[in-house]
Image: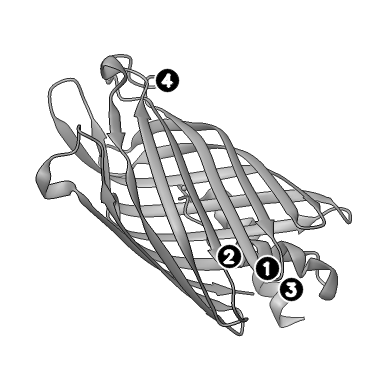
Amino acid sequence: MFKTIIATLLLTTTSFAAQSTYTPIVKADIINDLKEEQSNIHGFIKIDQDYISGLQLSTFATYQYSENFGFAINALMSENYVYQTKDVVANSYYGEVDAGLFFNYKSLTLTPMVGIGFDFAAKKPLTLSAPQLDIIVATDKWYFESWNYIIVYSTFEKNLGSDYIHTRNWILYKPNNLFSFGPQAEYTYGIQHKHTIYGLPIGGHIEGTYNGNSLGMFLGYDVSPATNDSGKVAGRITLNHSF
């Protein structure tokens, strides 16, 4: 009962908040465990230290409408969201709220979503995050997750010129229920700016899970020629608590 109350409050309040969205193995556990709980609502809270955006706080919740279908909502706040203007690289205190659906069949989960981002410093809408598609395949020994989304700044600022496509993919081998490891690659492609590849970090991902909590770490090297020498190393630490 207590879990249900907390999850319901989260799902309600996050719709009024201002994505990596960065979602690890916990998402698959949440969706796959829906049948085991009396409540149809599940979610997690995430703290993320990201090489792109600094410290991020986010929440994710799902409501299971039927055995294979439901609704999803995500909210994120970031201390430092970097975007490229025509003249300079700019920083913003950033918030985003996303909503969509999830489809679950056996080991496969699809979560299409759309979202809107806000520049907290300027107090105005900044981006559309659409479309988005998260893909998860989770088995006893293997876990695969792929994020795919488009960030559109030009909806609100015609001269900004920094719309981009981002995809993030990792596949992990799970020798036991506590530890998993595998490769990860991320790709960011600028739609404007002469179609520049903003980043292509390739590296390794390790993850530890215990009793609904997980700690994930990614360390990679950016092989994109557009990335300067000081930004070649990419890293991320993510702590999740699910409920």
- Write down the residue under mark 3: 4
Q: Earlier in the sequence, mark 1 or mark 3?
A: 3
Q: Is residue 106 left or right of residue 205?
A: right
What amino acid type should be assigned to the residue bearing mark 3?
Answer: Thr
> In front of the other: label 1 or label 3?
1
The answer to whether marks 1 and 2 mark residues whose Cβ atoms lie closer than 8 Å is yes
Which mark sits nearer the N-terminus, 4 or 2? 2
Q: Residue at (62%, 81%) from the top-left corner?
A: 177
Q: Say how the picture is coloured.
A: one colour
**Residue 29 bears which disc, if any?**
1
Q: CA distance from mark 1 to mark 2?
A: 7 Å
Amino acid type indicated by mark 1: Asp
| In contact (CB < 8 Å): disc 4 and disc 1 | no
Counting other residues with Cα less than 10 Å from the Cα at mark 2, is it few (<14), some (14-19), or many (20 or more)?
many
148 and 18: which is toward the camera = 148
> Which residue corresponds to mark 2?
25
Q: Quadrant of residue 200?
A: top left
Where's residue 32, x and y in %?
76, 65
